[in-house]
Image (cartoon, rainbow, N blue to C red):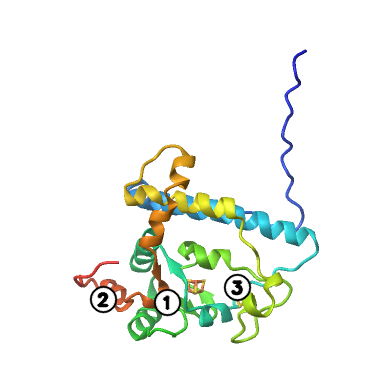
Amino acid sequence: MKKKAVKKRKKRPFKGSILAKRVTFPEETSIPWLGMLLDCYFIADKGISLEINKRLKRGEVLACKKGCSSCCHIHFTIPVYPLELVGIYWYVIEKLVGNEREIVKRQLKEFKKGSPCPFLIQGSCIIHPVRPLACRHFNVFNRPCEPGEDPYYTRRNDVLTPNEKFKQRALSAMLPFHGIKEKSEKKRLSRIGVLNSVVKNMHEIDWKNLALRMDGKRPPLGP
Ligand code: SF4
Ligand code: SF4
């Protein structure tokens, strides 16, 4: 007897649920790596919203919101992958204008290891559409972090555990940037280790270089 095909029911979003949206820029058609980066972030954001929604459904409250930013003052080990760094350079040089551009430029010039993130302006992330995976993955529930508090140590249960499958898939989406063009996701996933050798710590990056590039200068060391 023929088996009946089991239709997978699409889960309906509930009131207050978070929906991941892919960011787009018109430049994607002319900048090959940009679409790759935005795809990577979309995959990660889907995994993040999935996990956040599970907790919202259980009645927990997401504490992270615009203007809440003590995390951006105290996290000094934020990994930034090369494709992410290129994305930040592009966004800052091409998209920031006016006063915000000047503030970021000054913060980049003055940045020292241990300073608050140079992309933070009045409690908001000025590079939000291209903020690194690590920033996307850090979400806290129930109450906002106290100034100086790292809830990973003070109340681990309030910190979202990222969806590992989506996290790995997002990383694997970056591999073509490093010349790894395996078609099957399985093969790409097996090569993610490559990224460990090229990842940088946000606080060890020479951000003055980016400030110079914002002025149209071409310092010898690129991102
Ligand atoms: S991680 Fe903490 S400080 Fe950062 S946005 Fe969330 S609640 Fe606010
Ligand atoms: S990149 Fe944005 S979200 Fe990440 S630490 Fe900096 S200001 Fe915060």
Q: Which kind of residue does numbered mark 3 sit on?
A: Lys
Return the residue at label 1. 100
| Residue 92 occupies quadrant | bottom left
Category of crowding for the residue at label 2, using alpha-carbon neighbours closer than 10 angstroms: few (below 14), some (14–19), many (at least 20): some
Crowd around label 1: few <14 · some 14–19 · many ≥20 (10 Å): some
Residue at 42% x, 37% y is 183
- In the picture shown, does residue 29 fall above or below 85? above
Q: Position of residue 106 (x, y in %)?
A: 36, 83
Question: In the image as oriented, which residue stretches furthest toward the right?
Answer: 59
Q: CA distance from mark 3 to mark 1?
A: 16 Å
- Comparing labels 3 and 1, the label whose residue is closer to the camera: 3
| Front residue of 212 and 96 | 212
Q: Amino acid at mark 2?
A: Leu
Query: For the point 41% across and 73% down, which residue is it?
Result: 202
Callout 1, which amino acid? Glu
- What is the x, y in percent for residue 96? 39, 69
**In the picture, which quadrant includes the C terminus?**
bottom left
Q: Say if 149 sits above or below 15 in the image.
A: below
Q: Residues within 10 Å of mark 3 (few under 14, many from 20)?
A: few
Observer-nearest of 166 and 136: 166
Identify the residue shown where x is 78% and y is 58%.
57
Q: Which of the two discs, 3 and 2, labels the residue nearer the N terminus?
A: 3
Q: Secondary structure at mark 2?
A: helix
Instruction: Ligand 1: give its quadrant.
Output: bottom right
Residue 221, given in percent of the width and then of the height, sits at 23, 70
Q: What label does residue 212 carry, if any?
A: 2
Q: SS for tag 3?
A: loop
**Residue at numbered disc 3:** 66
